[in-house]
Structure formats: structure tokens, C-alpha cells
Image (tube, coloured by chain):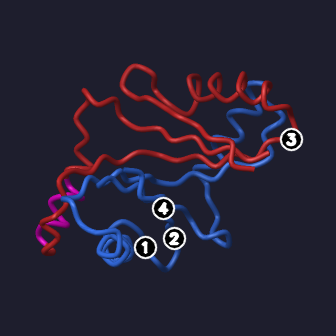
Chain colours: A red, B blue
Amino acid sequence: MKVRVLVSFKDSVLDPQGQAVKNALHTLGYGGVIDIRQGKVFEIELEDISVEEANRIIPEISDKVLANPIIEKFEYQIIE
Amino acid sequence: MKVRVLVSFKDSVLDPQGQAVKNALHTLGYGGVIDIRQGKVFEIELEDISVEEANRIIPEISDKVLANPIIEKFEYQIIE
């Protein structure tokens, strides 16, 4: 089973990396870019487990290891 | 329009961050994790442009700014 976890700053948290990328794009002439938020993506290959089991484990490891729940949020998709 | 760009190392490139996360999860008892690859995700808000225009601009800025095409690959989805 393959799962993709997306971790990004909560909307209320400033994202200086995203801002820097946005400014770089404006300098290069891409003025149509209104906003950019940068985050992390984890592609996790798991031993074959049930979808229920995955729905239990993935939020657990996201909360404990992949994201910092104070300033970050996560979402995940089972992709395979 | 909102676009999500996922940037990750090419499969042939070692991913030490992903390895470190995998080892951390094994230490915590999540032995079912076979592999983890870590990458970056950019959520880009664009002025309203056509899908064709987006399909021209997004690969361009991914290649120039968001990813290092020598060691990284990218994929994108128009999400809104």
C-alpha cells in the first residue's frame, strides 16, 4: 500500500519559504502568482494492511513524527 | 486557480531525510513501513488563467524555480 501525506503550515502561520518563492517568481516576470505556500510531502510504502488499519496508523505517525501539530496540518491520500 | 506541485527526488537519487524518518518510525515500533521518500509540495494560487495557460506556465516555473531538474522530478494537479 502506498500513502501520500501532505504536511503544510496552518493558514494562520507565516510561511517565509513560500513568500521567498513567490517573490522570486515575480522577479522572473510571473506576476500572475498570487500566493504560494510550501510544505512537505511524504510517500510512504506500507506492508499490505487494511484500509481501516491505514486510517488508524497514518494519522498517528503524521501527528507524532511527520508534522508538528502546533503549527502544521496534514492530509493524506491512499494512492495504491 | 489553485495548483499543487509535488517535487521529489528522482528514484535513482538517495533520500537521506526519508531514510531518517523511516528509521525513526521503526524505532517507534512502526515496522510495517517499508520505505519513505520525502519531497516538497507547493500550493500555488494563480490569477484566473485558462487550463492551457496553466499547463504551459506550471511546468516552466517548476523547472526553473521549484525543482532542480538534475536530481528532482515534479508532478502537478490543478485542484481548483
Spot occupied by residue B62 in the image (x, y as percentages of width and height) = 37, 70
To which quarter of the image does residue B54 belong?
Answer: bottom left
Q: Residue at x 37, y 53 (%)?
A: B42
Q: Is residue A36 left or right of residue A46?
A: left
* Residue at 34% from the left image edge and 75% from the top image edge: B52
Mark 4 or 1, which is nearer the eye?
Answer: 4
Q: Which residues are magenta?
A: A20-27
Which quadrant of the view contains residue B27? top right
Q: Which numbered disc, 2 or 4, marks the residue that appears first in the sequence?
A: 4
The answer as to whether the residues below labels 1 and 3 share one chain is no
Q: Are labels 2 and 3 on one chain? A: no
Same chain under badges 2 and 4? The reply is yes
Circle 2 — which element? strand
Callout 4 crowding tier (Cα within 10 Å): few <14, some 14–19, many ≥20: many
Viewer-closest of A30 and B35: A30
**Residue position marked by numbered label 1 in the rendering:** B68
Residue B26: percent from the left, percent from the top?
77, 33
Which residue lies under the disc numbered 4?
Answer: B7
- The Cα atoms of the two marked residues, 3 and 4, are separated by 24 Å
Q: Pointers 3 and 4 in contact (CB under 8 A)?
A: no
C-alpha gap between disc 2 and disc 4: 7 Å
- Chain letter for the residue marked with disc 3 in the picture: A
Quadrant of residue B48 within the rendered picture:
bottom left
Measured in 3D between alpha carbons, the distance from the residue under mark 4 to the one under mark 1, in whole angstroms, is 9 Å
Q: Contact (CB < 8 A) between labels 2 and 4?
A: yes
Q: Is residue B51 above or below residue A76?
A: below
Local packing at callout 3 (Cα closer than 10 Å; few below 14, some 14-19, many 20+) is few
Per the rendering, the mark at residue A47 is 3
Which image quarter is the N terminus of chain A in? Answer: top right
What's the mark number on residue B72?
2
Q: Secondary structure beneath disc 4?
A: strand
